[in-house]
Amino acid sequence: MQISLSAAEIVDIVRPLASKGATTAIIGGLAALRGAGAGELSFLGNVKYKADVAASAASVILLPPDCAVEPGTGQLFLFVENPSVALARVCARLERTLWPRPAAGVHPSAVVAPDARVAATATVGPLCVVEAGAVVGERAHLQAQIFLGRNARVGDDCWLMPGVVVTAECELRERVRLHAGVVVGSDGFGYEFVAGRHEKVPQVGQVLIERDVEIGANSTIDRARFSRTVIGEGTKIDNLVQIAHNVVIGKHCLFCAQVGISGSTTIGDYAIFGGQAGVAGHLALGKGAKVGGQAGVTRDLADGAFVDGYPAIPIQLEQRIRVLRQRLPALFRRVGDLEAEIVRLKKSSAA
Amino acid sequence: MQISLSAAEIVDIVRPLASKGATTAIIGGLAALRGAGAGELSFLGNVKYKADVAASAASVILLPPDCAVEPGTGQLFLFVENPSVALARVCARLERTLWPRPAAGVHPSAVVAPDARVAATATVGPLCVVEAGAVVGERAHLQAQIFLGRNARVGDDCWLMPGVVVTAECELRERVRLHAGVVVGSDGFGYEFVAGRHEKVPQVGQVLIERDVEIGANSTIDRARFSRTVIGEGTKIDNLVQIAHNVVIGKHCLFCAQVGISGSTTIGDYAIFGGQAGVAGHLALGKGAKVGGQAGVTRDLADGAFVDGYPAIPIQLEQRIRVLRQRLPALFRRVGDLEAEIVRLKKSSAA
Amino acid sequence: MQISLSAAEIVDIVRPLASKGATTAIIGGLAALRGAGAGELSFLGNVKYKADVAASAASVILLPPDCAVEPGTGQLFLFVENPSVALARVCARLERTLWPRPAAGVHPSAVVAPDARVAATATVGPLCVVEAGAVVGERAHLQAQIFLGRNARVGDDCWLMPGVVVTAECELRERVRLHAGVVVGSDGFGYEFVAGRHEKVPQVGQVLIERDVEIGANSTIDRARFSRTVIGEGTKIDNLVQIAHNVVIGKHCLFCAQVGISGSTTIGDYAIFGGQAGVAGHLALGKGAKVGGQAGVTRDLADGAFVDGYPAIPIQLEQRIRVLRQRLPALFRRVGDLEAEIVRLKKSSAA
């Protein structure tokens, strides 16, 4: 990662509310507060690390407005509303260096069906396969080794990273990002048990991924049995997540890594799922529902519900029970003591 | 998905036990009861949705024989033994449109070793790699970007979807379906701790996948340390499942998404695993064993055992304990009350 | 797997401390004690299977020095310090047959940027993509359908199996093995919530994988937000594992399948994680920490800590609580009995 920014350039990007100190250093790297040295930019993104600010050797530090720390010699402190957002703006500048826009066009090694429609501004990278009837939108980027099935549609400004598979009839709207190895449109897991065997239930539906969705590496989104599996606008999905057939997910949800959502469950807007959480099938989860890491949801959730544990229950109750659970050894002793006391009391009252 | 079926054609496919009403609509889509409109086919697959039948606007609805509902104007109700199976038959008809049989032959962009044996009726799609000594059976379909290692064997009528990897010496019997990104024959996870380092234990065994097995997207099946990892006939595995080295799985088992089976465990026929369940290594699970979602199996299971929780115990006990667990706050209060009573009783008896 | 070794050749490989019996059989296969027949080699790797030794028909058996069993006719028992390590040495001999060293050179179907630097002794297999500025070290093996992004570096003697993706700027040191479908350098999962939407935080850091690391099929390692995600020397990672952005892992750790480590957590040398375990973000886990299967770590761990359960607590306490948890039905009865006794005692004392 090549970076070379003057203090003035950084000020221009982050537009601070206030500043303290000054530096003539040219910023050549980003680093956490503790590890940063001269010539590097750092930030306080989590109050947990507040104590590290004073000790940091970073030449420029992005800080929240209420952070009462004085810069050392040659240090510039920039106070911004949200240091994390400010840093993201610096990184966005760097990103263009890391992943320069590819030239438009179809790489000669790609195998593109004659009747596929690839926009003139789109990029189809090396060793991609684009099947008959598929559509690739304006400025869309199929990086390399992508598979796009029959009649699949990739919207404008989508970015599909190496090894992504989008099967027949599935659709991505605008600005969808699929990381390496994502599979969109694998068959749902549906069988009927007939005469001692699991007979396959054909999965002839589609997947619709709305605009601004991002899906992490090696995650899998199953096509519907019929109709559509839907991922709503702006929803972000981490790596190795499983979304089963006929699931309908609202807008702006977050799914951390290794979450699994079973078939036909619907999820409201702004829901959030911690890592490795699981949700049973045919449930309805309300808007803004929150599910803790590793939790297992077995019932419908109301709007705004926050649950944890397995089976998942309201988080306050779950947390209380977790504390009590660790006191079980003491509780068993207490009950034993009570039983002994009762024996003594019965003896003395019989006496 | 293009569909266009008359009522008579649907009757011909599902062969109903009885019918009520009539429709002249041409069926152009499938939909759930609630969302279906005129010109669509729906079905009652789960009694949970029974109330939706009367309100549904679907032109044709598949119903169980005992469903006492009257069709509206222009609606045809078809009573069938199993609406879900009947719908599957309609979908199977559609499937041929979605995924037409590919033409036989090897795509010119595929890289096939001269001494690989590819049946004349097989299809090796674009950008596949087929290494020396590999065998591809009659009518087998390597869709695109498949890797088939040295001496690997793919049986008749198998279907390998884009990005599948089958490594050296592994074998798939007839009609195996591997969804996108499946890896068959990755090394088992085996090391010996020698002089402060984990020294690799070579994994020189194979994987044998019996006929009619289906494996979901991005699942991984490790090769044996020696001898074979085996997936039995008719077993169905969902997405992102991990099967470790030397595991031997019986016939007609079901593994929901994200399940993990540790090394050398054997599993009897007809076993069923809920999503995200895990099984420790070197265990023997009996025929028809059932394991709940997210459960963790740490001991052998008898035939027909149904377990849940972590560590997994018989499900009736686990369910009872889960209820009691939620009453822990009350139990702690009750014990506190008892302790206070004892103090009072002791005082009064001492008095 | 072709194998053909005389008893003398096996003795030469394993160099036993002592031996009993003799065989003229040529060893043509390896098998577990129970299933092995004449002409096969077996071993006692786990005391659990000790009873199987006497009944085994294997022609050669590798045994620990203290194993007092007599060979049958035509059987050779070889006593070695560690039968598992001895078997590994035999398997290492076989491995060369299974995966012969490929010829050096770039396959004509690979797409290699003109300014990528591929060592003359390296192998770049069919249908690989190597982007501008990428470096492939001496004897490195990119097996097939690999993607190597801009300026990515693959060290000497690395082995990347089919479908592996290493994105821009990431680095693998010497002898790293990546199994099929591994993704190194996917974006970290980072967003800022701004005006009702999750705005992407650019992920412009790298991944550094130190020497002798092995990573299992379809696992994913995210690039850092900035700076580096690090996997330390000699660490071994199983299949379907998720390592989030900015995680720093020490040397010689073990991660069983489906483990997930959240962002910015640091892990000391020699830590071990059971299958499906999860670790929250921004934690520090000490050297030699051990985490049980399916456990969920929510706090820092001291050096050598061994935890289990969710939330993870010291394993002795967790195991004790698990036993008590199963006695909850009895405890509720005991408390009910106590309450009844108290009522009786109060009545009798009032009388």
Image (cartoon, coloured by chain):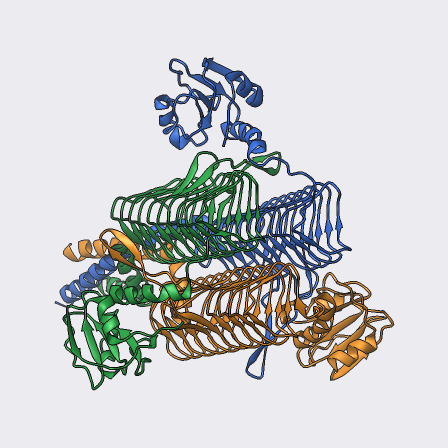
Chain colours: A blue, B orange, C green
Quarter of the figure with residue A70 = top left
Which of the two residues, A288 or B232, is positioned nearer the viewer here? B232
Quarter containing the C terminus of chain A: bottom left
Residue at 31% x, 46% y: name it: C251
Q: Count of labels shown?
A: 0
Asked if C204 appears above or below C335 in the picture, the reply is above
Quarter of the figure with residue A120 = top right
* Residue A334 spot, x, y in % from top left: 23, 57
Tell whether B171 sits left or right of B282.
right
Tell whether A224 sits left or right of B69.
left
Answer yes or no: is residue B100 visible: yes
Which of the two residues, B93 or C52, is positioned nearer the viewer here? C52
Query: In the displayed image of the protein, which residue is found farthest to the right?
Result: B24
Asked if B6 appears above or below A228 in the picture, the reply is below
Asked if A32 appears above or below C264 in the picture, the reply is above
Query: In the displayed image of the protein, which residue is found farthest to the left?
Result: A351
Tell whether A212 sits left or right of A38.
right
Query: In the displayed image of the protein, which residue is found farthest to the bottom?
Result: C73
* Residue C144 spot, x, y in % from top left: 52, 56
Which of the two residues, C349 or C168, is positioned nearer the viewer here? C168
Tell whether B275 sits left or right of C322.
right
* Residue C224 spot, x, y in % from top left: 46, 38
Answer yes or no: is residue B21 visible: no
* Residue A158 spot, x, y in % from top left: 66, 44
